[in-house]
Image: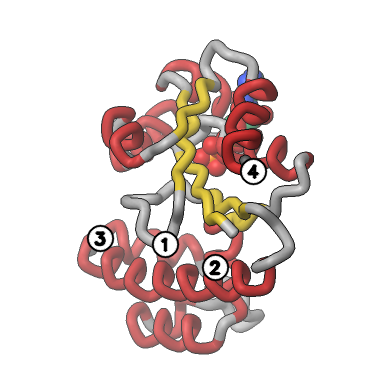
Amino acid sequence: MLKVGITGGIGSGKSTVARIFKLLNVPIYNADMRAKWLILNKPSVKESIIDLLGSEAYFHSGEYNTTFVAGKVFEDQNLLIKLNQIVHPAVKIDFEEWCFNKEGHYPYVIKEAAIMKNKIGLDHIIYVYASEEVRLKRILSRDHRTVEAIRRIMEKQFSEKEFRSISDFVIDNDSEMLIPQVLSIHKKLIS
Ligand code: ATP
């Protein structure tokens, strides 16, 4: 069973592309959603976050205090690195366990993630491309975010060149139709 990554910058269309693969019966692992779940539900992750940031990282109700955490890591870059060192390995293990349960049932599975620095643990990477201007327009009509906030996130993410350098397939979600591109990649992955 192949493990295939889908990545791309904010608003590039990763989830939209993943939804099309899902229609082809390909299981999708959403790394951001699973990270949020693990932060809330995996005791070892929760304990490590409290050790790092203090008990205010969680409300009494058990909810994650994202405002508090965002403030802490914004002040101190080192804390952000350490927080990622807690969450990223937990997601890696969770993904491996998820894959183990799918083994033998599907020709390939997909991991969708905005952060995919290299191909480690994956057989292929699909990069979803759309220009910054197109992404900005789409995000503005999807989210309540300011142009400045979106640009700040874009600046921190991989550049188009960096994304292309780690990818085996590129889906153009700027000016091309998505479905034929997804079908073409799907055919290659199952052949
Ligand atoms: P994020 O990085 O924020 O998780 P994403 O890469 O998963 O975003 P999507 O949520 O799939 O991106 O797409 C961003 C927005 O653009 C959504 O509102 C989606 O419906 C819209 N969109 C995606 N592809 C297209 C397209 N080809 N034409 C028009 N709108 C699109």
Q: Are marks 2 and 1 in contact (CB under 8 Å)?
A: yes
The residue at the point 45 percent across, 52 percent down is 123
Up/down of 172 relative to 76, above or below: above
Going by the image, does 58 lie left or right of 26? left
Rendered image: mark on residue 190:
4
Q: Quadrant of residue 33?
A: bottom right
Query: Horizontal and vertical percent for residue 16?
Result: 65, 34
Q: CA distance from mark 3 to mark 2?
A: 30 Å
**What SS does tag 4 mark?**
helix
Residue contact between numbered discs 3 and 1, judged by CB atoms under 8 Å: no
The numbered disc on residue 75 is 3
Which SS class for mark 3? helix
The quadrant in which residue 29 appears is bottom right
Ligand 1 falls in quadrant = top right
Which element type, helix, strand or loop, lies under badge 2?
helix
Disc marking residue 95? 2
Q: Amino acid at mark 3?
A: Glu
Q: Which residue is mark 1?
A: 121
Q: Amino acid at mark 1?
A: Gly
Gap in angstroms between the C-alphas marked 2 and 4? 21 Å
